[in-house]
Amino acid sequence: MARNPTSDAHDRILDAAADLFDRYGVHAVGMQQIIDELGCGKQLLYREFASKDKLVVAYLQRSTRDWDRTLEDAAKAADTPEEQLVEVVRAVQMMAPGTRGCSLRNTHAEFPQPDHPAHRISVDHFRTVREQLRELARRTPAANPDRLGDRIMLIIDGLYASGSILGAAGAAAEAVDFARDVIRFETSPAVR
Amino acid sequence: MARNPTSDAHDRILDAAADLFDRYGVHAVGMQQIIDELGCGKQLLYREFASKDKLVVAYLQRSTRDWDRTLEDAAKAADTPEEQLVEVVRAVQMMAPGTRGCSLRNTHAEFPQPDHPAHRISVDHFRTVREQLRELARRTPAANPDRLGDRIMLIIDGLYASGSILGAAGAAAEAVDFARDVIRFETSPAVR
DNA sequence: GTCTATACTTTGATAGAC
DNA sequence: GTCTATCAAAGTATAGAC
């Protein structure tokens, strides 16, 4: 199984870059730092990613794929759409605290220029997430599924924010219970 | 009332810097840009703020004061602690969409180093906010006031995040109603 | 004397050449 | 993988206007 060192260079670079970006932020990490971490040459990096912007874009695109994966896993982990929504929140609660939070949101904050590719990717991502959550909510018996989806999105956004700053002991600790209560409320006969 | 031009230089600089920081982010704004915006000299700026870090710190401290002001105004705008909590959410919902969101959170994302003064200020701020909201919630008849405070905090954090990225039409649009439902739920006899 | 304006130094980054 | 061109930004120093 002779692996081709060239073919996985792309992923190896992205792994190292993503790790550094997640830990220190995009601006704080230089291309040289990524090269040092990898022990590769500059030529290789710039052949795989022609510029730092391209690298950042690839990093964010991978983050969106990771999110989609999270969503799929949550869907598999439960049978009812209600429990699937809870699973999404649980997944975020598991990974958010102790980290720097959501890569897409942090990078969004680091690149405020609306025309910057990193900015656009994150905006597109959050529009998609909103639609995904509403779509999931539409499969529940909620009277107002769009509202339920939006409320879960607020919880998730707050969870990333609170969890990354205050850690696991912060306001995010009980987010899953919160989500469960919200779903119960929105699908209760009183509201319907 | 002969005003001393020197004495308000500090505030004028801070005004201009805060505006630029809010719009473009701290990293993206250079000291020269602030000087150009103000039409002042470098000497003056560096006499009032010995370094960019000092300026950023002053900017964040002012943001925390603005938040305290928001909280006080919300307290005055309603009689019951329940409605005061709603007013806090309403205040955030009024200002968050269309802006870049919360200065403290954005700057937190821009300075991931735990020992950076900007990082510490924002962490302290969010710890304080959490306590303030819990304190407010304790004056309601909620069975679990800390939980109510934390849930309101999640909504506010999510509101800043969602509102700044997706705008007023995003998931944040109905945050006030959400907060109201949560407060009603947490103070309802069924939960108590 | 206080502020503006500009020139300079240093640092650290991207990017490319070899 | 080292070396270098280029550029932008933080500070510093200094010269000059009111």
Image: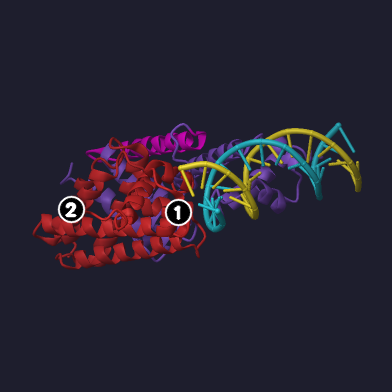
Chain colours: A red, B purple, C cyan, D yellow
Percent from the top left, x then y, of residue B101?
46, 53
User: Quarter of the image containing the N terminus of chain B?
Assistant: top right
Circle 1 SS class = helix
Tell me the tag on residue A86.
2
Taking the magenta stretch, the answer to whether it contains residue A75 is no
Circle 2 SS class = helix
In primary-sequence order, the first of circles 1 and 2 is 1
Q: Which secondary structure is most common in the magenta stretch?
A: helix
Residue B83 vs residue B10, the one in the foreground: B10
In the image, is residue A144 above or below residue A84?
below
Q: Is residue B20 left or right of residue B118?
A: right
Residue A134 vs residue B132, the one in the foreground: A134
Kindly tell me whether residue B169 is visible in this rendering: yes
The residue lying furthest to the left in this view is: A79
Taking the magenta stretch, the answer to whether it contains residue B117 is yes
Percent from the top left, x then y, of residue A39?
39, 43
Number of marks in the image? Answer: 2
Local crowd size for mark 1, using a 10 Å CA cut-off: few (<14), some (14–19), many (≥20): few
Bounds of the magenta span?
Answer: B116-145
Q: What amino acid is found at the position of numbered circle 2 in the picture?
A: Val
Circle 1 residue: A43
The picture quadrant where one finds residue A84 is: bottom left
